[in-house]
Image (spheres, rainbow, N blue to C red):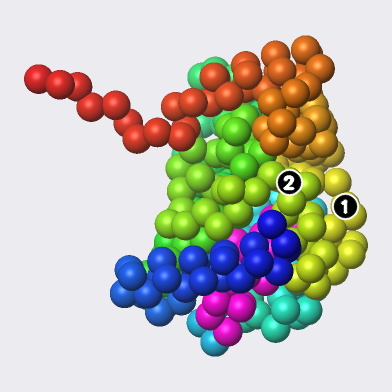
Amino acid sequence: METSVVVSKLVAWITKQVESANMQGVIFGLSGGIDSAVVAALAKRAFPSKTLACYLPCHSHPLDREHALLTAETLGIKLIETDLTPIYEHLLGILGHGDDAVFAVPTVSLANIKPRLRMTALYYYASLHSCLVLGTSNLSELTVGYFTKYGDGGVDLMPLAGLVKTQVRELAKYLGVPEVIIAKPPTAGLWAGQTDEGEMGITYKELDEYILTGEADPHVKERVDALAAASSHKKRLPPIPKL
């Protein structure tokens, strides 16, 4: 399908979903990465005067802020900036993380608090402005469960959920996302030096090819299938017993 057609369909879909919910616009987290930049561009087309981006740093790299601001300025989108670092640190103090902690806390457990705090902030702002929350996860991430349950997975709409990462990159080029954002290595920014591909153990090219064609090297298939199985609980509602 032509990129222009995909964009038109996604913009129309976002508009219809928001209007059907009797809401006035959309809100989303702008991280400085390519996925949120594409969502921003789609949102701006759907709701030119009722699109709100939120930059919600939490021990984030300064470059993330630079790229988030660049995206907002390039697309002409209103941006709210709220630093969640103090509340994150305060919460860890309450929970007992540190030298006096009862048990060692894995890095991923600490990292997952950040997107969950962002989810809370997004829904607060969404309530204030009568907006739906747009997610930025793509099909590649959803396939292997590369998102935080009730964090960046806690949204109202997922416009990129039917597109793999390479397709999102094509949309970014078409939508005028700054090249510096398109070209940089994808990262969730959860800790220093963290990258998507490094954490997954495979490249997006390998993952996307497997999703789109069903073909891949054995080690890629094994890795993707294992990640998908381990994260399957993230993609369904909590089980309810039959009594």
x, y percentage for residue 75? 72, 79
Q: 227 or 221, which lies in front?
A: 221
Q: Is residue 144 above or below residue 242?
A: below
Query: Element type at marker 2?
Result: helix
Query: N-terminal of the two: label 1 or label 2?
Result: 2
Secondary structure beneath label 1 = loop
Residue on which disc 2 sits: 165
Picture residue at 71% right of the left edge, 31% below the top: 213
Quarter of the picture containing the C terminus is top left
Residue nearest the viewer, comparing 54 with 18: 18
Q: Nearer the viewer, residue 125 or 107?
A: 125
The magenta segment: 29-48
Magenta span main SS = helix
Mark drawn on residue 184: 1
Residue farthest left in this picture: 243
The x, y position of residue 223, in whole percent, is 71, 18
**Quadrant in the picture for residue 85:** bottom right
Height in image: 209 above or below 103? below
Q: Amino acid at mark 2?
A: Lys
Q: Residue furthest front?
A: 1
23 lies above or below 6:
below
Position of 16 with respect to 224 (left or right) is: left
> Which residue: 80% across, 72% down?
176
Lateral position of residue 32 relative to residue 83, left or right: right
Answer with left or right where residue 8 lies relative to residue 128.
Answer: right
Residue 25 horizontal/vertical position (percent): 46, 76
Question: Is 39 a magenta residue?
Answer: yes
How packed is label 2: few (under 14 Cα within 10 Å), some, or many (20 or more)? many
Q: Quadrant of residue 144?
A: top right
Amino acid marked by disc 1: Lys
Query: Which one is in front, 118 or 25?
Result: 25
